[in-house]
Amino acid sequence: MKEAMNCIAEKDYTGANDNLLRAQDITDELRGALDLSTGNLAVGLYALYDFVYSCLLKANIRKEIEPIDDALTVMTQIKDAWEEAVRSYG
């Protein structure tokens, strides 16, 4: 995502597209890996991944940095939460 932000800033829209598509694919895989029948955690993560995917799509269509920043913020918070869970319960 950071590379896509750099590409947009440099007006390298092909590079931005490639990087955003890769991030969208990864986000889509994360959504697809969730078993929504396991409860609220999976449903909540699905909603967050859906938001991230929407931000990436918007950024790619509009070639704007702000939606990528929003997506990156959410994904960083998810990563931090998993790291804390591993430290606490690992």
Image (cartoon, helix red, strand yellow):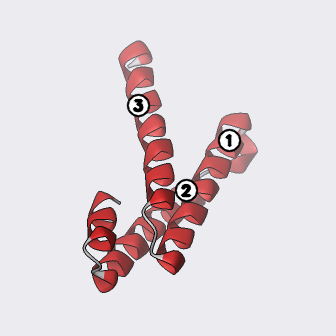
Is residue 65 found left or right of 57 in the rendered image? Answer: left
Q: What amino acid is found at the position of numbered circle 3 in the picture?
A: Asp
Quarter occupied by residue 16: bottom left
As drawn, 43 above or below 82: below
Residue bearing the label numbered 1: 44
Identify the residue shown where x is 50% and y is 44%: 74
As drawn, 38 above or below 81: below
Label 3: element kind: helix
Q: Which of the labelled discs sits on residue 52, or is there none?
A: 2
Between residues 18 and 39, which one lies in front from this camera angle?
18
- First in sequence, mark 1 or 2: give its number: 1
- Quadrant where the C terminus sits is top left
Is residue 17 found left or right of 67 in the rendered image? Answer: left
Residue bearing the label numbered 3: 80
Label 1, label 3: how many angstroms apart (C-alpha)?
16 Å
Identify the residue shown where x is 43% and y is 63%: 26
Q: Position of residue 22 (x, y in %)?
A: 38, 71
As drawn, 56 above or below 78: below
State the residue lying farthest toward the top. Answer: 88
Q: Position of residue 79 (x, y in %)?
A: 41, 37
- First in sequence, mark 1 or 3: give its number: 1
Q: Residues within 10 Å of mark 1 (few under 14, many from 20)?
A: few
Give yes or no for contact between labels 1 and 2 (Cβ–Cβ under 8 Å). Answer: no
Is residue 52 found left or right of 68 in the rendered image? Answer: right
Q: What amino acid is found at the position of numbered circle 2 in the picture?
A: Val
Label 1, label 2: how many angstroms apart (C-alpha)?
13 Å
Label 2: element kind: helix
Label 1: element kind: helix
Identify the residue shown where x is 28% and y is 79%: 15
